[in-house]
Amino acid sequence: MDIQLKRLLRISSSYTRYGVAVISVLLSLLLLPLWGARSPFLMLIPAVMVSSYYGGLGPGILATILGGFLGFRFLPQWSCESVLNPHLGDLLRLGVFFSIGVFVGFLSWRLLSEKRQAEASSRSYQESEKRYRLMVEQVKDYAFYTLDPHGVVNTWNTGAERLKGYCSADIVGRSFALCFPPEEIERGKSESILQDAIAHGQWVDEGWHVRKDGSLFWAEAVTTALRDERGQLQGFSQVVHDISDRRQAEETLRKTNQTLQSIIQASPLAMFPRDAQGVHHER
């Protein structure tokens, strides 16, 4: 059923496109007496343009052929004998009209094709941007935001709002340096991160970040330099993940190892660590 419907729609669309070509030519011919019949072929060029732009190359060629033969009727010296035995000048006019008509029709068709391609690309870009925005907004555990070449925040996702406490209205248009403690700002950490990202393309950094309420958390930040096809810097993207729990676990393990090492060194007993093969290693 759907296939038949699609076929009917395609057939209907074809009839419409070629019907517009016929109507355009007939309207032009009806208006010829108002403009004079000295150059009927010239007045038919708009019909060819409309047919090609609306329907494509096929309807444009149909309008050219139909307009050429019907326009022949409006030549000043037209007669039944002239149709059977046309003058050379009339044939030249007809040939020039056909040439111009095909050329104009082709240009109009190309213009229509380029317009449709641009519209399709625009729709595809908008759909991709929408999917990308939805994807970014759904990421809750990571802060994702973009910066301009000077480090000013351009976009801010919900994960960034949750992690850092700033809503989009609070932070967009301001420097991302607000996310660092004051002492790090004084040391120029934000500028250093951007310079490293420019130099290496991407830069991974771990350190203290500050929330809107002033609380600190240990984060891993991946900063990527964004460039266009010519290599010109357009800005940066930054993905930030709170790794405070991992850092705390690593710190606990480090302290445990230090404590164990102190016990081993202070023990009067001969305690030596073994490797996986049971070999002693004296310290």
Image: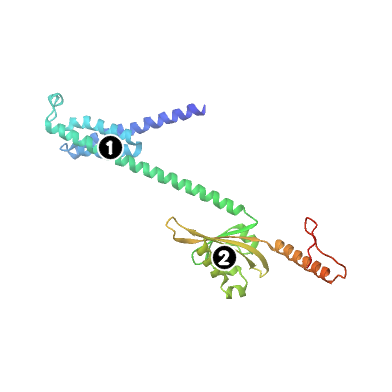
5 or 225, nearer to the observer: 225
Q: Where is residue 63 in the image (x, y as percent from the top left)?
A: 28, 33
Question: What residue is drawn where x is 55% and y is 69%?
Answer: 192
Gap between marks 1 and 2 measured at Cα: 56 Å
User: Given contact means CB atoms under 8 Å apart, are the residues at marks 1 and 2 in contact?
Assistant: no
- Numbered badge on residue 171: 2
Question: What residue is drawn where x is 52% and y is 67%?
Answer: 195
- The residue labelled by disc 1 is 48
181 or 33, nearer to the observer: 181
What is the three-letter code of the residue carrying label 1? Answer: Val
From the viewer's perspective, is residue 218 above or below residue 76? below
Q: Where is residue 253 in the image (x, y as percent from the top left)?
A: 76, 64
Q: Which image quadrant for residue 157?
A: bottom right
Q: Which image quadrant for residue 55?
A: top left
Horizontal side of 259 relative to 105 (left or right) equals right
Q: Position of residue 56 (x, y in %)?
A: 34, 36
- Residue 124 appears in the figure: yes
Question: What residue is drawn where x is 65% and y is 64%?
Answer: 219
